[in-house]
Image (cartoon, rainbow, N blue to C red):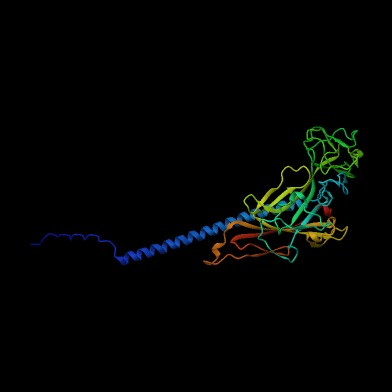
Amino acid sequence: MNRPFQPRPKSKQRGLSLVELMIALVLGLVLSAGVFQVFTNSSQTYQLSDSLSNMQENVRFAVGRLQYETRMAGYKGCLIGQPFNNLDTGGTGYDASIYGGQPVAGWEAAGTDLEDEYTNDDFASAANLTQASAGALLPAALNGSVLPGSDVIVVNNASVANVTLTGNPGANANTIVTAGNTGIPAGKIIMAVTSDCSGGDIFQKTNAANSVSLTKGSGQDPGNQTPVNNGFNATYDDQATIYEFTSTAFFIGTGVSGDPSLFMRRLDAGDPFGNVELVEGVENMQVLYGVTNPGGETVVNYVSADTVADWADVASVRIALLLRSDDGVQDGGREAGEAPVARVYNLLGTQITTEADDRARMVGNLTVGIRNRLE
């Protein structure tokens, strides 16, 4: 008689052997290391790409702003020749680099001339800057703000004022009458141009912003020539054009984050803003000036500021900027234990050696013809 089928009882699970456990741990570690490496590489690539993208955006903005400003240097509307200078050249606030009639002026950082080598690692001390025009000093408003190793450029021009003239020429030879409050505060530098473009005056407005006129008086700095009742050099009717004179310096200073940045500052009298940070992470700026033969319009050579013989001969400008990333994003390219290295960048013929760090860097260049100098 056949016995019924009896299934064998299942054996109980007794766990993994030591060999199996070690193999599982090794496989897990290998997989974890691979995932960690992929994550690390992806993170480093993202940080580098993000930094490069930010620097490219900053380069475009900085280059675009400098390009526009320098192209419009020396703008004075339709005026033929230079406006008559009513400003007091002996006033404490008078600076020929600002009010002398040239479109641009510049200061060269010590040790950064053509073919010089400069180590750009001092972002704390004051700069040593010189200029060609009889050794003119850096404008007082910039003292203590400019970092060493970077040049300074000043752009002088004018912008149309939002005023309407009426009742001109008036009885007072020191006043141009407006249709309402000018909104222009006392102390601003004004340029007036006649309706036929044959004459103009530059002077300091001395009456209040709520006045219905532009008055050339006294009591401001640098002030107007004395006696102030000499009147304007030209006669203005209601079709004349009024401009606000502006003088803007661009330089490298210390930003709010502690990093070097591109700054601008208005140097003309009456500026209420002070230093304005434009682009963070700009650690060096080099400037060359295209000079013509006296009285000519064709640029024959590019020179640094300390070798410009006459600023009236400058017809174009070259500017190079060196930007850096916020953080060290290139450490992934070094071997373990390897120290970061300094790098050398050519900025318009000046060899700039950076700090030894892992920051990414980028150079921006522009060459601009001064439109109002070439016309």
Q: Position of residue 330 (x, y in %)?
A: 57, 61
**Count of numbered circles in the view:** 0
Asked whether residue 214 appears in the rendered view, the answer is: yes
In-image side of 321 versus 11 (left or right): right
Q: Is residue 125 above or below residue 270?
A: below
Nearest the viewer among 187 and 349 is 187
Q: Tell me which corner region of the image, top left, top right, bottom left or bottom right, holds residue 229.
A: top right
Q: Position of residue 236 (x, y in %)?
A: 89, 38
Nearest the viewer among 253 and 48 is 253
Asked whether residue 369 appears in the rendered view, the answer is: no
Q: Quadrant of the N terminus?
A: bottom left
In-image side of 151 versus 101 (left or right): left
Which residue lies at the image location 78% right of the left edge and 61% below the top edge?
304
Q: Is residue 174 above or below residue 284?
A: above
Which residue lies at the image location 61% right of the left edge and 63% below the top edge?
356
Which residue lies at the image location 82% right of the left edge and 35% below the top edge?
207
Q: Is residue 267 above or below residue 21?
A: above
Q: Position of residue 179 (x, y in %)?
A: 82, 32
Nearest the viewer among 146 and 39 is 146
Q: Tell me which corner region of the image, top left, top right, bottom left or bottom right, holds residue 124.
A: bottom right
Q: Position of residue 9 (x, y in %)?
A: 18, 59
